Amino acid sequence: MEEIVTGKQMKELDAYTIETMGVPSLVLMERAGLQVFESMKKEGLPLSKVLVLCGSGNNGADGVVIARLLFLAGYQVHVCILGNPEHFTKEMKTQIEIGRNYGISFVKTFCVHEYTTIVDALLGVGLSREVSGLYRETIEKLQDFSGKIAAVDIPSGIDADTGAVWGCAVRADLTVTFAYKKAGLCLYPGAAYAGKLLTADVGIYHKDKRSPELFACTDRELKKLTRKPDGNKGSFGKVFLAAGSREIFGAAYLSGQAALRSGAGMLKLCTPKENRGLFTCFPEAMLALYEDAADMENLVRENLCWADVAGIGPGLGTSPQAERLLETLLKYADKPLVIDADGLNLLKGKEKLLKSCKAPVILTPHLGEFARMTGISVKEWKKNPLTITKETAKKLGVLLVCKDARTIISRGTEETCINLCGNDGMATAGSGDVLTGLILGLLAQGLSPWEAACTGVYLHGKAGDLAAEKKGRAAMLAGDILEAAGEILKEL
Ligand SMILES: NC(=O)C1=CN([C@@H]2O[C@H](COP(=O)(O)OP(=O)(O)OC[C@H]3O[C@@H](n4cnc5c(N)ncnc54)[C@H](O)[C@@H]3O)[C@@H](O)[C@H]2O)[C@@H](O)CC1
Ligand SMILES: [K+]
């Protein structure tokens, strides 16, 4: 996994490295500047004439280092420092002095059109208020700039914790962030302002490695999924999935296929009797067909004994029968239960039943479903996704997967997972059904609910990226994501 930090945590890590480990602040800064300089070259930014915009804090001081390195490498570079000299940090004063000794050019005013690249070192993780005055005017001037912009640590104006824009912000082509990705670079709109995001090692170190509060999955988590040479279909897990209705069949198909494609040994689909004929195209699935409510309840109870995990929702509809099915599962499930789609729409008013459920419950709402379920609007969630997801998970006593461009996963504890892969092509019918199936498949193979949810979302995102590569973001279908998930597991 990859750790992600807030601005406050980053400052604590900086301070620890400097004060406890004894690495001088100027050494870290030199490494930071060098990393940005090298990245700008490697990424092919046009460096024939560069303007470095610096604020009064240490982000600005990084900027002066970058200017010096560019100057020494023979590039034409100007530095423009904003902010009150009385507020310059100690490091900033030192960097200006060094820069002067080297003879780099400091300018008071500038015309953006003169430059091919602008380095944004105005504000870093120290941003603490609305951007106004000269800072705002300067950032607004960059809107007319047609060259490339490289942001130091974080685009100025972006909140390091939430990704929100403090009035206005720099739209960068490249952001080189130090040591760890900041949460605000991972969440929208900050993620969009960052452009290409690179994380650079500058020597930040903490002796007591604690488990991260915020993290993103990587291939390492997926690689933990292994087959057992002596396993059988029973040992790879049995999935019981209540899905599909008289009107909708495809959702059940996609979800069930995804469970098997991610490696589950057996799948039993619980669906209305009328659907029997439709499933001839899915011979791998066993069927638990019900006709009426009494029928359905017995069937569910029987199959819960058979299954290792259960899921409900894809294509279920919101009929009284579907509602009864959900209530039955909540009442009797004692193994992990995944609730998605219409299962979520039917949850309103069933908080008590949810709380008393003996099984660990995973809810996978997209933001519309989340809003219907909780009464918290999409707009409100987007303002503070990490905290709201965590608090809601805690309140409901569930593991919550809030699906968005950056899906957030929380089980109400201090630990939160944010997914960094995937693309807008995944906003297509059936994509969520595939995710539900993948999570079920991973649960069936013995992953804990937390591991299955985080890894499942990551696998889904990676599969979406592969599908987009093959079919294009507009044309890709949920079935392509499903197929790509299998290919990714094969590669690993
Ligand atoms: N030695 C260190 O501590 C290191 C620091 N690093 C850099 O230092 C940055 C953090 O430095 P600082 O803590 O000095 O913070 P910043 O440089 O991000 O900004 C702080 C300054 O900006 C002012 N400010 C905040 N919001 C403002 C606004 N809206 N408009 C105008 N001024 C505003 C603050 O009052 C303060 O003077 C990191 O982002 C990183 O770039 C890196 O060089 C790594 C090492
Ligand atoms: K910056």
Image: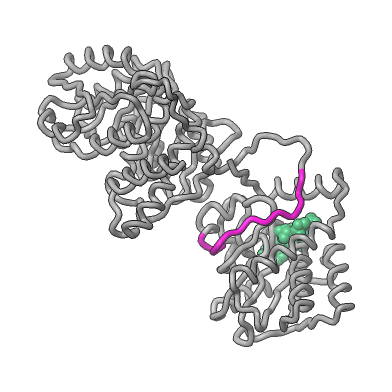
Q: Residue at x 76, y 83 (%)?
A: 107
Task: Please state which of residues 280 and 411 is positioned toward the viewer in this rendering.
Answer: 280
31 above or below 318? below
> Percent x, y for residue 348?
34, 31
Task: Verify whether residue 2 appears in magenta.
Answer: no
Residue visible at 86% across and 43% down in the picture = 20
Q: Say whether residue 457 is left or right of residue 11.
A: left
Q: Depth check: give the residue in front, 249 or 201.
A: 201
x 32%, y 44%: residue: 483
Q: Residue at x 46, y 32 (%)?
A: 452
Q: Position of residue 447 (x, y in %)?
A: 47, 27
Quadrant containing the N terminus in the rendered view: top right
Residue 265 visible in the shown view: yes
The image quarter in which residue 265 lies: top left
Picture quarter with ligand 2: bottom right
Residues in magenta? 192-205
Which color scheme is applied?
one colour
**Is residue 344 visible from the viewing direction of this image?**
no
